[in-house]
Image: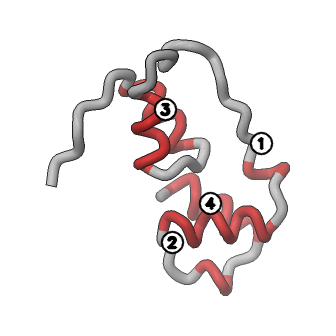
Amino acid sequence: MSRPSIKNEEQYEALKDQGYSKEKAARIANSESSGEKGGKAKPYEERTKEELYDQAKEIGIEGRSKMDKQELIEALRNH
């Protein structure tokens, strides 16, 4: 299944790397202000384990309940 066209592919990939879901990253990258600097999300290391777990749950990472904080960060970055 192909995904819809992304106006700002570089921003889309950067947002996914920061932990945004594919859907949210696409909405931001396709917005009118997609070329403007933003990035208000805290780095993973500054988030609580609970916040990381919730993010992992949102994007469907398997085995998240057994992961420690560092493992959650790695899973989110590699998803």
Which dot marks residue 28? 3
Q: Assign a secondary structure to mark 1.
A: loop
Q: Is residue 79 above or below residue 24?
A: below
Q: In terms of sequence position, does the residue under pointer 4 or pointer 2 come before the other?
A: 2
Instruction: Name the residue located 15 percent from the left edge and 55 percent from the top edge.
Output: 1
Which of the 4 image quarters holds residue 70?
bottom right
In percent of width and height, residue 10 lies at: 42, 25
- For mark 4, what is the residue? 74
Using the image, determine if residue 9 lies above or below residue 56: above
- Marking on residue 42: 1
Q: Which numbered disc flags the more N-terminal residue, 2 or 3?
A: 3
Label 4, label 2: how far apart the Cα atoms are: 11 Å
SS label for mark 4: helix
Residue type pointed to by label 1: Lys
Horizontal side of 48 relative to 17 (left or right) equals right
Q: In the image, which is nearer the foreground, mark 4 or mark 2?
A: 2
Q: Secondary structure at mark 3?
A: helix
- The answer to whether residue 21 is left or right of residue 7 is right
Q: Are marks 3 and 4 in contact (CB under 8 Å)?
A: no
Where is residue 33? Give x, y as percent: 51, 16
Q: Find the distance from the CA under tag 4 to the CA under tag 1.
A: 16 Å
* Amino acid at pointer 2: Ile
- Residue in view at x 42 percent, y 49 percent: 22
x and y percentages locating residue 47 in the rendered image: 81, 55
* Amino acid tagged 4: Glu
